[in-house]
C-alpha cells in the first residue's frame, strides 16, 4: 500500500475548538448532506498549507506572472496568456519557493491528491528497522499539530540513535539523499531525518498530518 503525507489545514485564530470538533467527526457516520456541511465549514475556518508557504500568486506577484508567461510560451500559447492568466488568477506557484524542510526531497508528484509539499511516506518502508513497528504503523494516522510534533521528535530520536552508532550524524542536516544505494543504512537514516524535519516544520506552523493512500 502506498502512503503520502499532506499537511492538514490549520485553524484560523479563534476557531481552534471548532476545528478540533470537526476533525474528530466520524464522517462515515454522517449523512451525505452533513458530510458536505462539515467539509464546507472546515474550509471556512481553516488555512490551507499553500497559504502557510507564502508562494507568489498569479495576478498578484510579478514573479508568478512571469512564471505563467514562460509556461504558456513553452506550450506555444502566448496569444492566450491573458485568458490563462485570468483563469489562474490567485494560483499559488509553489515552484517559485526556495527549498525548506516543508518541501520534501522525498516527494510525490504526478497524480491527484499530492503537491510539492507532499512527503512520500512510502519511503519509510526502507526505514522500518530504524524506526520500529510502532512508529511505522503510526505513519498512517491523522495527527493534530501537537501529535505531529511529538511524532517528528520520535522519528528524529530514532534516526539519531542509529546515526551515532554508525557515524552518520551528518545526514541530519543534509537535504539531498546520500550517494549510497537505496537499500543502504545511509539512505534509510536520511529518509528518517527528512521525514522528521518535515513533521517538525509543518507542526511548528500549526499544521497536523493528513495521510493519503
Image: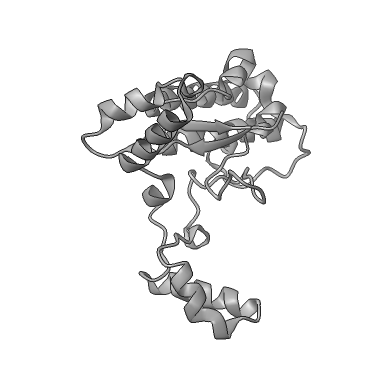
Give the camera-side residue of 70 and 192: 70
The C terminus: image quadrant: top right
Q: Which residue lies furthest to the left in this view?
A: 14
Q: How many labels does the image show?
A: 0
User: Taking the image as drawn, is residue 205 in sight?
Assistant: no
- The quadrant in which the N terminus is found is top right
Q: Which residue lies furthest to the top in this view?
A: 134
Residue depicted at 61% across the width and 18% down the height: 137
In the image: residue 111, left or right of residue 68: right
Residue 170 placement (x, y as % from top left): 58, 37
Residue 108 at x, y percent in the picture? 63, 45
Query: Which quarter of the picture shows residue 167?
Result: top right
Q: Is residue 171 visible?
A: yes
Front-most of residues 74 and 176: 74
Q: Where is residue 26 in the image (x, y as percent from the top left)?
A: 46, 20
The residue shown at (64%, 30%) is 189
Q: Which residue lies furthest to the bottom in this view?
A: 79
Hey, which quadrant is residue 89 in on the image?
Answer: bottom left
Residue 79 vs residue 100, the one in the foreground: 79
Above or below, comparing residue 91 to residue 116 in the picture: below
Q: Colour scheme in the image?
A: one colour
**Residue 197, x across and y down, in percent:** 49, 36
Q: Is residue 56 above or below residue 21?
A: below
Vertical side of 87 occupied by 110: above or below: above
Q: Which residue is drawn at 23% across and 38% down?
A: 13
At 25% from the left and 33% from the top, the residue drawn is 15
Left or right relative to 94: residue 45: left
Amino acid at each position: 500500500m502506498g502512503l503520502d503525507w499532506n499537511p492538514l489545514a490549520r485553524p484560523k485564530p479563534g476557531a481552534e475548538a471548532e476545528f478540533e470538533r470537526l476533525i474528530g467527526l466520524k464522517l462515515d457516520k454522517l449523512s451525505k448532506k452533513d458530510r458536505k456541511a462539515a467539509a464546507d465549514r472546515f474550509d471556512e475556518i481553516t488555512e490551507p498549507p499553500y497559504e502557510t508557504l507564502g508562494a507568489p500568486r498569479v495576478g498578484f506577484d510579478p514573479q508568478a506572472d512571469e512564471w505563467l508567461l514562460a509556461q504558456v510560451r513553452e506550450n506555444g500559447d502566448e496569444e492566450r496568456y491573458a485568458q490563462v492568466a485570468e483563469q489562474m488568477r490567485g494560483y499559488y506557484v509553489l515552484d517559485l519557493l526556495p527549498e525548506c524542510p516543508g518541501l520534501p526531497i522525498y516527494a510525490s508528484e504526478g497524480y491527484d491528491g499530492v503537491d510539492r509539499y507532499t512527503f512520500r511516506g512510502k519511503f519509510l518502508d526502507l526505514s522500518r528497522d530504524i524506526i520500529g513497528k510502532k512508529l511505522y504503523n503510526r505513519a498512517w494516522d491523522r495527527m493534530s499539530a501537537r501529535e505531529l510534533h511529538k511524532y517528528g521528535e520520535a522519528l528524529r530520536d530514532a534516526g539519531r540513535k542509529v546515526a551515532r552508532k554508525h557515524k552518520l550524524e551528518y545526514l541530519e542536516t543534509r537535504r539531498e539523499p546520500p550517494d549510497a544505494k537505496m537499500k543502504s543504512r545511509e539512505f534509510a537514516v536520511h529518509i528518517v531525518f527528512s521525514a522528521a524535519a518535515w513533521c517538525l516544520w509543518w507542526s511548528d506552523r500549526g499544521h497536523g498530518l493528513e495521510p493519503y493512500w
